[in-house]
Image (cartoon, rainbow, N blue to C red):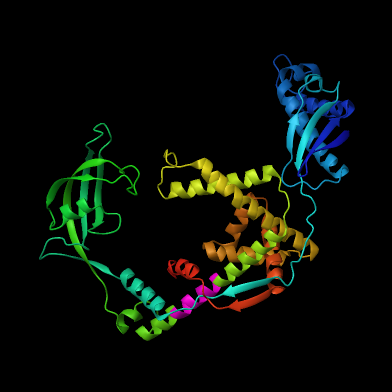
């Protein structure tokens, strides 16, 4: 076997590989004989067909098997021979010629494109100065969560002495027909709950259902705005016939010790509840601060180490992120084929983030190499148990999933990077600074604590 490396770019090597005709003939004979033993050929006893007949009858299958026998080993040998450290799987380009048409009579030539990374020269990564800012928990934060808990505990009680009002929940069967597109399939839904005046409810719906009682039937027209959240209704004009089955009002429990006790055995009073809520929020904001500090540390590391990434690797990571976005949108009921969605712009945005993520991951791997950080079987067992607890599965179920993804060691790389980041944090100069970024505070407040 012969191999020669050509540099296509600093991150892409092309290996020209030639497999000797003698090696091809040996594999060709072995595969042909294997087929001869198993093949059923008319006119011959099973397993006794001549090699030449089998080669003619199963030409394409035998050639595929020969290539499977030869090429992977040849690629690995060439990579080792030329002391390359590939990132990801090589991309193969097989030359069509006499080597493939007349197996065993001529060498087989092909190219393997291998993504590589120049050795990362580490700068300063110990003693990096990073700030940790913990958002202070205020009384209004606690009260907001307590009120949310009251809302979650609310019950819907039937209204019997009046018509529906804003804030009430009207349950009804809806039949809607599109007035501007008569051929469109009509809407027929049953037992739909509509909160009058609620978020996402158009004003015409609230206006026409205000005052209704059970068994009432109403017909009215709704003009949906162009920017309506449901794309299938945006800008459309529908005539609805609505048959009301129930009108209910929300009853929020009193803020008292009896209600507080219903939330958990360890809670005896509203004071206990507020204490627990404050403790939960404080734990969450500390967790948020820790995560942001770690992200800032990685950001500083990436910004301090500039190096070129293999384009194919960035493309793969970008497509992986894009597929994840599409899946999330589909799960949310969003039509990903909508013409207003600019997927090329989204891909460009995701490409930048993909490159950042790859640099961070590769830098953590390089630091793990430098510090000789390893992942033990005990580390993997602990991670599997943590995944099982978080996903409410058994450890055996998690192991089964990992087996399909390449085995339990498939999570070793992620664990090793996490340990490298733990090392960075332990050796960083962490400054506990006061919370002062109003924009950051506004973002944090928008996330309701659990």
Q: Quadrant of the C terminus?
A: bottom left
The answer to whether 16 is drawn above or below residue 189 in the figure is above
Nearest the viewer among 317 and 353 is: 353
Residue at horizontal 76 percent and vertical 23 percent from the top:
96
- Residue 64 visible, this orientation: yes
Is 142 rendered above or below residue 9? below
- Side of 239 relative to 105 (left or right): left
Residue 1 on image: x %, y %: 88, 33
Q: Position of residue 104 (x, y in %)?
A: 85, 23
In the image, is 61 to the left or to the right of 23?
A: left
Q: Is residue 292 magenta?
A: no
Q: In the displayed orientation, state which residue is furthest to the top.
A: 43
**What secondary structure do most residues of the magenta stretch adopt?**
helix
Taking the image as drawn, is residue 269 in sight? no
331 or 180: nearer the viewer: 180
Q: Could you tell me which residue is drawn at 47 percent across and 76 percent down? A: 280
Residue 285 lies within the magenta run: yes
Q: Nearer the viewer, residue 231 or 63?
A: 231
Q: Position of residue 383 (x, y in %)?
A: 63, 64
**Residue 295 vs residue 51, the one in the foreground:** 295
The answer to whether 362 appears left or right of 322 in the picture is: right
Res. 382 image quadrant: bottom right
Residue 21: give x, y in percent of width and height: 87, 25
Q: Is residue 119 above or below residue 136?
A: above
Q: Which residues are magenta?
A: 278-288
């Amino acid at each position: 076997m012969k191999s020669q490396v050509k540099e296509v770019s600093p991150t892409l090597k092309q290996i020209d590989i030639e497999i000797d005709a003698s090696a091809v003939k040996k594999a060709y004979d072995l595969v042909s004989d294997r087929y001869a033993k198993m093949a059923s050929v008319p006119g011959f006893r099973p397993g006794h067909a001549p090699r030449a007949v089998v080669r003619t009858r199963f030409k394409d299958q035998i050639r595929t098997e020969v290539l499977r026998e030869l090429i992977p080993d040849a690629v690995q040998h060439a990579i080792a021979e030329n002391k390359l450290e590939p990132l990801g799987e090589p991309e193969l380009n097989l030359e069509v010629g006499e080597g493939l048409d007349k197996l065993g009579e001529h060498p087989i030539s092909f190219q393997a494109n291998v993504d590589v990374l120049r050795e990362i020269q580490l700068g300063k990564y110990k003693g990096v100065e990073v700030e940790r800012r913990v958002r202070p928990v205020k009384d209004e934060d606690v009260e907001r969560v307590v009120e949310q808990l009251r809302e979650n505990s609310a019950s819907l009680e039937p209204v019997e002495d009046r018509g529906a009002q804003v804030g009430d929940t009207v349950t009804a069967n809806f039949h809607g027909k599109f007035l501007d597109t008569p051929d469109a399939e009509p809407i027929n839904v049953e037992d739909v709950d509509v909160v009058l005046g609620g978020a996402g409810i158009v004003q015409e719906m609230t206006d026409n259902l205000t005052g209704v009682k059970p068994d009432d039937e109403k017909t009215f027209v709704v003009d949906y705005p162009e920017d309506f959240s449901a794309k299938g209704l945006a800008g459309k004009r529908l005539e609805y016939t609505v048959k009301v089955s129930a009108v209910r009002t929300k009853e929020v429990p009193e803020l008292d010790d009896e209600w507080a006790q219903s939330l958990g055995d360890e809670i005896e009073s509203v004071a206990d509840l507020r204490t627990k809520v404050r403790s939960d929020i404080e734990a969450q904001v500390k967790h948020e601060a820790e995560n942001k500090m770690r992200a800032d540390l990685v950001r500083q590391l990436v910004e301090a180490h500039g190096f070129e990434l293999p384009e194919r690797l960035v493309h793969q990571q970008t497509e992986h992120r894009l597929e994840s976005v599409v899946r999330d949108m589909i799960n949310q009921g969003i039509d990903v084929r909508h013409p207003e969605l600019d997927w090329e712009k989204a891909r460009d945005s995701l490409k930048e983030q993909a490159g950042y993520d790859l640099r961070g991951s590769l830098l953590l791997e390089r630091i793990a190499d430098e510090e000789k950080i390893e992942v033990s079987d005990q580390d993997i067992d602990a991670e599997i148990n943590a995944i099982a607890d978080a996903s409410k599965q058994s450890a055996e179920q998690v192991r089964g999933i990992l087996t399909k993804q390449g085995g339990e060691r498939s999570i070793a790389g992620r664990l090793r990077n996490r340990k490298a980041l733990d090392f960075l944090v332990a050796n960083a100069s962490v400054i506990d600074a006061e919370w002062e970024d109003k924009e950051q505070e506004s973002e944090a407040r928008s996330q309701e604590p659990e």
